[in-house]
Image (tube, rainbow, N blue to C red):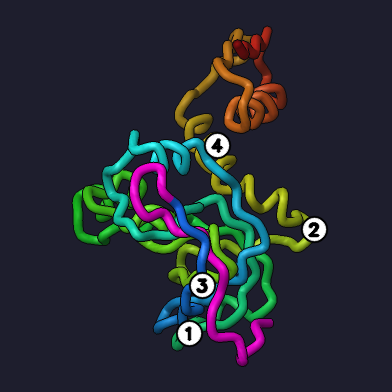
Amino acid sequence: MMDQTERTMRAGVFIATERMEAGNLPIPQPGAGEVLLKVLACGVCGTDYHIYSGHLTAGVEPPVVLGHEIAAEVAAVGEGVDRLEVGQFCAVDPVIGCGQCRMCRSARPNLCDSPAIIGYKLNGGFAEYLAAPASKVVPMEASVGAAGGVLCETLACVLNGYSRLNLPAGANVLILGAGTVGLLWLQVVRNSPVGRIVLSEP
């Protein structure tokens, strides 16, 4: 549980292209429907590098704390939050849809016209704490551990793609790239009734 005497937290803040600064920020306070999360671990996604290097700017609003592959525990809950408790281990869905566009209304907020993404527009996991909507916090068994929790957001992306693939039984599969995403695809596909699997890495 967070020490209530703490006032600030350490954070890595993206300031501008190829410029990040380490410093102290106020610890956020969870509003209604939000939770305060203590970050246990945060992955460095390729997207974080693309933001840092200036190759991805859409939806990014510096100064902002990057990091969206987050494993955390609940440090405090805001008003109206009753499904999460202090101390719970969790992962975070970083995409917060506007709730108004056609994609949000068809239950596809990941394709929202104007999303607020944790680690892009909202402060993310390269800090000791972050506030997030309770609806975007996913409780997990503590046995998953911080290293496993960090992979949850990436694995969710892989499983979403796999659910759309409709692989026929016996199909041969080629996976291009053996980074984190490629290796997660390998774990999913090798547990499917497919034929030959080829994993290619330069």
Report the front residue among 128 and 197.
Answer: 128
- For marks 3 and 4, give the CA distance: 37 Å
- Coordinates of residue 126 in the picture (x, y in percent): 54, 58
Query: Mark 4 or mark 1, which is nearer the start of the sequence?
Result: 1
For mark 2, what is the residue?
Answer: 143
Q: Nearer the viewer, mark 3 or mark 4?
A: 3
Quarter assignment of residue 56: top left
| Residue 69 in picture, x, y percent from top left | 55, 50
Q: Distance between the residues labelled 4 and 2?
A: 21 Å
The magenta stretch is 1-19
Disc 1 marks a residue whose amino acid type is Gly
| Circle 1 residues within 10 Å: few <14, some 14–19, many ≥20 | some
Residue at image coords 67%, 72%: 88
Callout 3 environment at 10 Å: few (<14), some (14 to 19), or many (20+)?
Answer: some
Residue 195 visible, this angle: no
In whole angstroms, how far apart are the C-alphas of marks 1 and 4? 31 Å
Residue 130 drawn in magenta: no
